[in-house]
Image: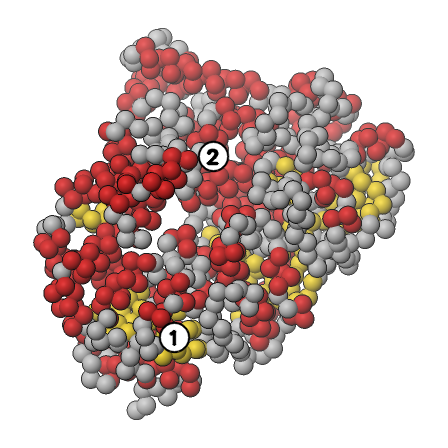
């Protein structure tokens, strides 16, 4: 039986070469796992013993699947004795056997991330440092990065450049924490995950006899996903293979996307120099995607300077062009995607599980989650939590619930000490005891602690009173303030913004993005109802009802039913789907603004898009939004530069409403030009990035309301709701809503100016336009308009007079809406 009969020529050549170092560059969908498994099976068929073969992977799942495949090829008896597993699992086995040589007992404990952070937290407290500045996650990230670059705690502490860097980050004592952390781990006979690598390297470096023993034991070493290795992983592989040089690395430099975890693309780019005489094999046939998708991905990645040249091809069907579908807003973008999911599912007869929505950051999931729930499309968040299930969002919602209902016991317990205000678990238990014994709520006990016999000291009593006054102030404002203004105040005054915005590590940045997206969602919630004249639905209770329906949908449905997958591009690596949507392709999102200062980081962003596109088998749709709620206001960004880099012959740029797209900045509506603030890292003289996908007709008229303030603005707050007191009572549906709206307008109508006239908002107000002319300002039935959020539509009907003039508009993707022209934001298209 020919073991290799199912391999193509390139795969077979890579498998059969076992006489020296080899590098297998496996393009997307080219059969990388097949080559690895067949190569190990081939080594076994040539008489090599299974225990003499070391195969290193990055996940237990990958190791398990490869071992199962090898078992089917050569039998489980051989496969089960392979020295195969993750870097950490393999090297922990070596360390167990050799621990005494580096000062540990072989029963050492392995600290996970939680254990490590807990220890760091204790050290910070013992050293009397500010735990708000020295957050365990941030300190641990710095220690981990140093370890993976083989820097000792002593060297780190004494490095002047590192000290200055940490000092600028307001963490000058990280070096001392690092030293104490290493000492404490040693005292506890414990190793963290990074130690499993660094101590293996140290063991081999300091004990040549031990290194030689393991180098002699393993006749062949294979490494999967070599482009994702860090410095210490690469160094250990070199230690093990320096004599025999029988090593095979498999990977794809074009899919190196984990530098934030310490991965170093130079490891694969320099492999042939590190292992002299390396034989290079290229797997260039893509079995996954259509020819068009492969060619589009190739045309994108060729713009990277630092790469191993390859010409990936496909013999599958040519397939349709890449679809590029720009939207007017993130709301319309989500509607376009939902519409396409339903259309393709109907036309192709496929399942919802055949679709993936890929985005750059987790925070972008919100608009798609909300639209999919609205459209009844089942989905799952792959490798993460639904937007409204994320901790920072649940914390804010708990504040909202407590303001809306002070008797909400679970809400109080969640946020009474968040952010930390010195009200500990013991105090909460005492409050609970008092509440249950007196059959009253927690809130009543907090409001009258002495009456209910709450036994706490004076300091704690003062903290409880401060908390009560804070929440009471929010309750009072909730009667006259829309949910965005109220939410913005809660986030600022509670200390949530300071807590979240002060962090610097990757987890903190994700929380910040989620907070910004949450604010944007509230702002859009208010603006949409305001435009439609639904002034009785701007308040906290209305928003909570809306969110409750969204969060309830998280637990709906059969968990096993086919669902659309929503995930970041990083989470999508290694997966494939018949249809892939890559969304949010805008400058300052994809590529990330953090990549702007570095060619190396920009190239990684390009590789990230390459990974996204090559997840698609049949359909690949790219989308973006010209306007997006960010930082609590509507902002404009240009399309991603990467769209321009894809061969134009391979893209269909579709404006489904039948119009052309925005052109140069001078061709855009004034609101689009005004809303895009210059980024701090942009040169004032440098034009912002422009794209070939920006061609539009000039606009004939403008109707733009003022943007909202947010916790990111520094100017003093003024009202944004002048002129609302003239609205008729006919707009309201209930006595409660009418009274709330009256209070709201009474509280805001006295302010003479609207908010947001600074650099990010040089827009024309629709109310000004209306007062200057007729009630409809020339708007007529049948006219085509472009709305800032809902996109393109046709005016069906105009009714009412003066400030109560309304237009009924049928939008291409957002359905029929009735807009109060005084507040509507749209342009009339010629």
Left or right position of 41 against 803: left
Coordinates of residue 566 in the picture (x, y in percent) = 50, 54
Which mark is drawn over residue 501? 2
Left or right position of 715 against 130: right
Residue at (64% x, 68% y) in the render:
647
Q: Earlier in the sequence, mark 2 or mark 1?
A: 1
Where does the N terminus fall, quadrant-wise? bottom left
Q: Nearer the viewer, mark 2 or mark 1?
A: 1
Q: Nearer the viewer, residue 748 or 798?
A: 748
Residue at (53% x, 49% y) in the render:
597
Q: Nearer the viewer, residue 442 or 303?
A: 303
Q: Nearer the viewer, residue 521 or 129?
A: 129
Which residue is labeled 1 in the image? 24
Q: Report the colour scheme.
A: secondary structure
Residue 268 in sight here: yes
Q: Quadrant of residue 342?
A: bottom right
Q: From the viewer's perspective, is residue 284 above or below residue 255?
A: below
Name the secondary structure under disc 2: helix
Residue at (43% x, 62% y) in the render:
256
Q: Nearer the viewer, residue 559 or 750?
A: 750
Name the secondary structure under disc 1: strand
Residue at (42% x, 86% y) in the render:
9
Q: Quadrant of residue 778?
A: top right
Left or right position of 647 against 462: right
Alpha carbon separation for disc pair 2 and 1 = 43 Å
Coordinates of residue 312 in the picture (x, y in percent) = 51, 75
Q: From the viewer's perspective, is residue 221 above or below residue 158?
A: below
């Amino acid at each position: 039986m020919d073991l290799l009969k199912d391999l193509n020529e390139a795969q077979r050549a890579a498998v059969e070469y076992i006489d020296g170092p080899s590098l297998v560059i496996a393009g997307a969908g080219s059969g990388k796992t097949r080559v690895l498994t067949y190569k190990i099976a081939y080594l076994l068929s040539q008489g090599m013993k299974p225990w003499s073969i070391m195969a290193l992977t990055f996940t237990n799942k990958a190791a398990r699947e490869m071992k199962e495949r090898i078992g089917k090829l050569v039998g489980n008896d051989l496969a089960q004795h392979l020295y195969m597993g993750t870097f950490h699992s393999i090297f922990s086995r070596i360390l167990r056997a050799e621990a005494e040589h580096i000062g540990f007992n072989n029963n050492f404990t392995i600290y996970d991330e939680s254990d490590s952070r807990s220890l760091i937290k204790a050290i910070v407290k013992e050293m009397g440092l500010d735990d708000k500045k020295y957050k365990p996650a941030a300190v641990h990230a710095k220690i981990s990065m140093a370890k993976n670059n083989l820097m000792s705690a002593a060297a780190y502490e004494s490095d002047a450049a590192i000290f200055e860097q940490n000092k600028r980050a307001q963490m000058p004592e990280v070096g001392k924490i690092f030293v104490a952390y290493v000492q404490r781990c040693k005292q506890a006979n414990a190793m963290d995950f990074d130690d499993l690598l660094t101590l293996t390297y140290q063991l081999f470096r300091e004990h040549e006899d031990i290194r030689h023993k393991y180098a002699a034991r393993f006749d062949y070493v294979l490494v999967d996903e070599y482009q994702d290795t860090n410095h210490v992983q690469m160094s250990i592989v070199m230690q093990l293979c320096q004599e025999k040089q029988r090593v095979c690395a498999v990977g794809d430099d074009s899919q190196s996307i984990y530098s934030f975890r310490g991965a170093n693309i130079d490891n694969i780019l320099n492999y042939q120099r590190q292992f002299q005489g390396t034989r290079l094999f290229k797997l260039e046939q893509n079995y996954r995607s259509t020819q068009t998708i492969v060619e589009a991905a190739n045309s994108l990645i060729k713009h990277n300077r630092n790469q191993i040249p390859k010409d990936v091809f496909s013999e599958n069907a040519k397939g349709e062009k890449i679809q590029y579908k720009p939207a007017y807003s993130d709301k319309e973008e989500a509607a376009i995607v939902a519409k396409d999911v339903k259309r393709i599912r109907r036309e192709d007869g496929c399942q919802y599980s055949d679709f993936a929505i890929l985005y750059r950051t987790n925070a972008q999931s919100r608009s798609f989650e909300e639209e999919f729930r609205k459209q009844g499309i089942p989905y799952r968040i792959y490798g993460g939590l639904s937007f409204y299930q994320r901790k920072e969002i649940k914390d804010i919602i708990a504040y909202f619930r407590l303001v809306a209902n002070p008797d909400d016991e679970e809400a109080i317990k969640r946020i009474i000490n968040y952010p930390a205000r010195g009200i500990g678990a013991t105090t909460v238990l005492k409050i609970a005891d008092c509440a249950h014994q007196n059959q009253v709520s927690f809130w009543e006990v907090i409001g009258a602690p002495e009456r209910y016999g709450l036994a706490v000291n004076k300091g704690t009593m003062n903290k409880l009173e401060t908390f009560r006054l804070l929440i009471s102030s929010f309750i009072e404002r909730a009667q006259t303030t829309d949910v965005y203004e109220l939410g913005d105040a809660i986030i600022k005054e509670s200390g949530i913004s300071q807590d979240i915005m002060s962090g610097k590590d990757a987890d903190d940045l994700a929380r910040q993005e989620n907070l910004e997206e949450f604010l944007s969602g509230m702002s859009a919630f208010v603006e949409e109802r305001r435009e439609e004249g639904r002034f009785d639905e701007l308040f906290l209770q209305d928003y909570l009802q809306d969110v409750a329906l969204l969060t309830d949908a998280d637990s709906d449905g059969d968990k096993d039913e086919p669902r659309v997958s929503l995930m970041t591009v990083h989470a999508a690596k290694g997966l494939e789907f018949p249809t892939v949507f890559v969304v949010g392709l805008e400058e300052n999102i994809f590529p990330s603004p953090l990549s702007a200062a570095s060619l190396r980081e920009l190239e990684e962003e390009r590789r990230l898009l390459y990974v996204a596109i090559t997840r698609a088998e049949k359909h690949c749709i790219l989308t973006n939004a010209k306007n997006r709620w960010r930082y609590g206001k509507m902002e404009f960004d240009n399309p991603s530069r990467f769209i321009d880099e894809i061969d134009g012959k391979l893209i269909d740029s579709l404006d489904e409403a039948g119009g052309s797209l925005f052109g140069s900045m001078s061709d855009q509506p004034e609101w689009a030009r005004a809303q895009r603030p210059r980024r701090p890292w942009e040169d004032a003289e440098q034009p912002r990035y422009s794209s070939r996908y920006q061609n539009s007709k000039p606009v004939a008229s403008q109707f733009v309301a003022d943007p909202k303030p947010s916790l990111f603005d520094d100017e003093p707050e003024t009202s944004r709701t002048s002129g609302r007191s003239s609205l008729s009572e006919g707009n309201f549906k209930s006595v409660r809503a009418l009274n709330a709206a009256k209070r709201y307008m009474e509280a805001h109508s006295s302010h003479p100016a609207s908010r947001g006239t600074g650099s990010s908002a040089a827009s024309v107000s629709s109310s000004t336009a209306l007062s200057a002319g007729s009630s409809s300002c020339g708007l007529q039935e049948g006219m085509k308009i472009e709305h800032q959020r809902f996109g393109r539509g046709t005016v069906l009907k105009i009714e009412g007079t003066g400030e109560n003039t309304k237009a009924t508009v049928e939008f291409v993707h957002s359905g029929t809406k009735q807009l109060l022209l005084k507040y509507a934001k749209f342009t009339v298209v010629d």
